Image (cartoon, helix red, strand yellow):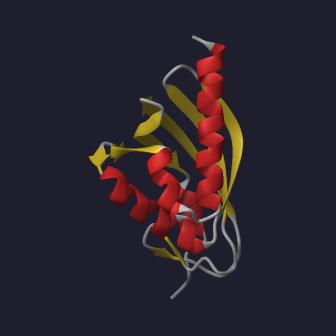
């Protein structure tokens, strides 16, 4: 493993997360492959942008990188997502108005310096525990 290559991937990844936090989906082509897949489903760049918009950006969710490990072509991260009182829905679940945090464990496969595959597992039980009571 080359520490300079893995260091570069860490820098790319941090810039990618910052772009998400800034709501800058127009720059995703700099970080994400045109043929990106998410949990085995082929989304393509446009579908991935829609996923980010629908689940993170439009929901005013903050992301903290808790742990970040890289090699020449992979990133593994533990991310802490924190909702806000304006977050109304997440992954199809209507939420109460109380902010909360949940964890995502995610592995990214990079090809040609861009995210090609995303393998994500997040704490759905915490999200469900904040479901709005109807």
Image x and y of residue 43, in percent: 30, 52
103 left or right, relative to 106: right
How many discs mark residues in the rendered view? 0
Q: Nearer the viewer, residue 47 or 61?
A: 47
The residue lying furthest to the left in this view is 42
Residue for point 39% across, 56% down = 48
Q: Give the x, y percent position of residue 66.
A: 72, 42
Residue drawn at (62%, 80%) of the image? 96
Residue 133 percent location from the top left of the image? 55, 84
Q: Residue at x 44, y 32 (%)?
A: 109
Q: Nearer the viewer, residue 56 or 103?
A: 56
- Is residue 131 positioned above or below 117 on the image? below
Quarter of the rendering containing residue 39: top left
Q: Is residue 48 visible?
A: yes
Tell me the quarter of the picture where residue 20 sits.
bottom right
Residue most extreme to the bottom: 134
| Quarter occupied by the N terminus | top right
Q: Residue 132's image quarter?
A: bottom right
Left or right of residue 100: residue 57: left
Q: Position of residue 67 (x, y in %)?
A: 69, 36
Vertical position of residue 59 compared to residue 35: above or below: below
Residue 42 left/right relative to 110? left
Q: Is residue 120 left or right of residue 64?
A: left
Q: Nearer the viewer, residue 58 or 22?
A: 22
Is any part of residue 103 visible from this angle?
A: no
């Amino acid at each position: 493993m080359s520490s300079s290559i893995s260091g570069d991937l860490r820098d790319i990844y941090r810039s990618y997360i910052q772009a998400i936090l800034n709501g800058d989906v127009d720059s995703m082509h700099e970080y994400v492959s045109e043929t990106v897949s998410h949990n085995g489903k082929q989304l393509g760049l446009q579908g991935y942008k829609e996923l980010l918009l629908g689940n993170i950006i439009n929901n005013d969710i903050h992301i903290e990188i808790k742990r970040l490990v890289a090699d020449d072509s992979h990133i593994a991260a533990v991310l802490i997502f924190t909702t806000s009182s304006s977050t109304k829905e997440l992954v199809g679940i209507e939420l109460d108005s109380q902010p909360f945090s949940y964890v995502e464990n995610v592995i990214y496969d990079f090809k040609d310096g861009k995210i090609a595959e995303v393998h994500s597992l997040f704490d759905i039980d915490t999200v469900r525990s904040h479901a709005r009571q109807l």
